Image (tube, grey):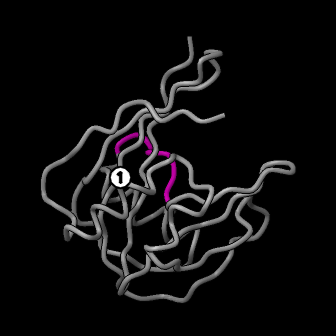
């Protein structure tokens, strides 16, 4: 039996925009919050800061967990536990990592999120959280698997 994967996705608001990375898998492209897999012995905050730097070239300060969700493939091939952390931009310069699945790194207006293919499908929650100044309670969003 394969263990669930823990992924830390990072919400980095800047003015009325949010940082996203565009991934390509074969012919399919989609946007994600920057982030990645939690390493053994690493805190959520350490993971968030490391992954954002690796994927975008930016330095951030991880603040707190905002959302939790799962993505469970009905065919049993994947189970991802998503931890969504709020963070603030500290510095650095945007870059696209070489030899990766990331095609683009960009800030997008919060108001445009619902028009993007975003995985996990958290655009409505991100828009609402931004409008409400990112409330302090942690919300469980349920299973958000999308084929």
**Residue occupying the far left of the picture:** 136
For the N terminus, give its image quadrant: top right
Horizontal and vertical percent position of residue 94: 58, 84
On screen, residue 94 above or below 63? below
Magenta span includes 15: no
On screen, residue 72 above or below 87? above
Q: Looking at the picture, tell me which residue is in the foreground, 145 or 87.
A: 145
Q: In this view, does 53 lie to the left or right of 14?
A: right
Horizontal and vertical percent position of residue 126: 37, 60
Locate residue 46: give its quadrant.
bottom left
On screen, residue 1 above or below 26? above
**Residue occupying the far right of the picture:** 27
Residue drawn at point x = 86 percent, y = 51 percent: 27
Horizontal and vertical percent position of residue 141: 33, 39
Label 1 neighbour load within 10 Å: few <14, some 14-19, many 20+:
many
On screen, residue 56 above or below 78? below
SS type, badge 1 = strand
Q: In this view, does 85 lie to the left or right of 114?
A: left
Query: Magenta segment range?
Result: 35-41
Residue drawn at point x = 70 percent, y = 63 percent: 102
Q: In this view, does 2 lie to the left or right of 96?
A: left
Q: Looking at the picture, tell me which residue is in the foreground, 58 or 68.
A: 68
Q: Looking at the picture, tell me which residue is in the foreground, 58 or 123.
A: 123
Horizontal and vertical percent position of residue 128: 30, 61
Residue drawn at point x = 37 percent, y = 38 percent: 69
Locate residue 22: give its quadrant.
bottom right
Q: Mark 1 points at which residue?
A: 84
Q: Looking at the picture, tell me which residue is in the foreground, 70 or 100.
A: 70
Number of on-image labels: 1
Q: In this view, does 75 lie to the left or right of 71?
A: right
Residue drawn at point x = 27 percent, y = 62 percent: 129
């Amino acid at each position: 039996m394969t263990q669930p994967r823990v992924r830390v996705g990072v919400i980095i608001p800047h003015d009325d925009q949010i940082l996203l990375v565009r991934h390509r898998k074969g012919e399919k492209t989609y946007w994600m919050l920057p982030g990645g897999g939690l390493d053994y012995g690493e805190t959520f905050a350490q993971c968030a800061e490391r992954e954002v730097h690796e994927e975008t070239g930016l330095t951030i300060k991880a603040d707190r967990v905002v959302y939790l969700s799962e993505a469970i493939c009905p065919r049993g091939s994947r189970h991802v536990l998503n931890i969504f952390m709020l963070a603030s931009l500290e510095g650095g310069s945007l870059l696209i990592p070489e030899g990766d699945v990331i095609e683009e790194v960009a800030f997008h207006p919060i108001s445009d999120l619902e028009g993007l293919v975003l995985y996990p499908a958290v655009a409505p929650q991100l828009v609402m959280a931004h409008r409400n100044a990112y409330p302090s309670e942690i919300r469980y969003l349920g299973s958000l698997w999308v084929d």
